[in-house]
Amino acid sequence: MSRKKTQLQVEPRRPAAGGKQDASGRRNASGGRDASGKDGREKPQLVSGRWLLVAVCGTIAAAAFCGWLGLCLLFWQGSWQLLYHPTADAHPAAAIARTPASVGLAFDPVAFAVTDTGVPRLKGWWIPATQGARLARFTVIYLHGQDGNLGDTVDALVRLHGVGVNVLAFDYRGYGASQFARPSEAHLRQDAEWALDYLTGTRQIDAGTIVLDGTGLGANLAFEVAAEQPELGGMVVDSPMDDPMGAIFKDARARLVPARLLVWDRYDVDAAAGTVRVPLLWFERVNATGSTQGPEAYKKVASHKMLVWLNPSGDANKEAADAMSRWLDGLAVR
């Protein structure tokens, strides 16, 4: 009788709770960590506090720089309004309110400096001298100041006409009915030169009989144009602005931006005065202290010149007209 062999069954040993089986089916004894001490998931990358601080500061700096650039752009676009105060026909409420006809003075509307498409850039008035006037050989280009438009100059034009000269008065671009454009020193100088070209080219007037007459900022402009046009007959200026650009550069907002790099206008009368070679008549007002010390720019003019102090309490218009008549008489015999 044969004997059956007893088969022994060996049960596999169960891994300890929490253990992790390795590639051979065994779990390590460290509760699921491999030999390198890492579990199966990657640990998240942590951002260092220093890097985060640099990133935040950089973002703030970039935002501040962009804001500053925006401020520079706004200043560049709008700073001209601190100096120039035009009224233009583009706005109905700012139309030219007066013309020479409103005081009985005959005039002809003129338009010149046409574009390639035939559109005139500048518009103004031609006021001829009274027939037989003694000084009718002279033609005055009137350069008004930085405010308003031609409608505000009628009284001054009446005074000039009373002297007995022909008068061309016009609005710069951006003023009155002239072409709309942002005023600037370069634009005003070009406009004045176009007026000269109109007289010498279209009306065939000898440059030696043309006189520039500027008031306020127009006087500063007259200096710059006369310095480049020595063939002119002469120049009359009424109270040039001592520091026109102070209206822009001394503004509180100009301290936040590089204003002198953004604005190119200068109107430097002192610099222009040193190169002026045409006869000069300069009007100034006696101030409250009664001082009659000549302006520095006047002292730098090397050509024939005359300085006249007007008393605001008297008839300044008559005094100015009489002085201009005497001065033009002197030009006529030169």
Image: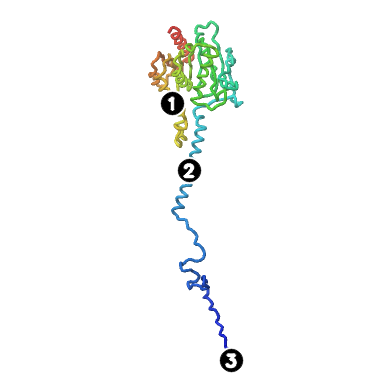
Position in image of residue 95 (x %, y %): 59, 23
Instruction: Specify the color scheme.
Output: rainbow
Q: Mark 3 points at which residue?
A: 3
User: Badge 3: few (under 14), some or many (20 or more) residues near its Cα, within 10 Å?
Assistant: few
Q: Mark 1 points at which residue?
A: 243
User: Badge 1: few (under 14), some or many (20 or more) residues near its Cα, within 10 Å?
Assistant: some
Position in image of residue 303 (x %, y %): 40, 14
Element at label 2:
helix
From the image, state whether disc 3 or disc 2 is nearer to you. Answer: 3
- Please state, as top left, top right, bottom left or bottom right, where the C terminus lies in the image: top left
In this rendered view, identify the residue nearer to me: 154 or 60: 60
Amino acid tagged 1: Asp
Give the distance between the C-alpha atoms of the residues marked 3 and 2, in whole angstroms: 98 Å
- Please state, as top left, top right, bottom left or bottom right, where the N terminus lies in the image: bottom right
From the image, state whether disc 3 or disc 1 is nearer to you. Answer: 3
Which sits earlier in the primary sequence, circle 3 or circle 1? 3
Which sits earlier in the primary sequence, circle 3 or circle 2? 3
Q: Mark 2 points at which residue?
A: 64
In this rendered view, identify the residue nearer to me: 116 or 296: 116
Element at label 3:
loop
Element at label 1:
loop
Image quadrant assignment for residue 283: top left
Which sits earlier in the primary sequence, circle 2 or circle 1? 2
Amino acid tagged 2: Ala
Kindly identify the residue that appears in the image at 47 percent across and 41 percent down: 65
Position in image of residue 267 (x %, y %): 45, 24
Give the distance between the C-alpha atoms of the residues marked 2 and 1, in whole angstroms: 33 Å
Residue 292 appears anywhere in the view? no
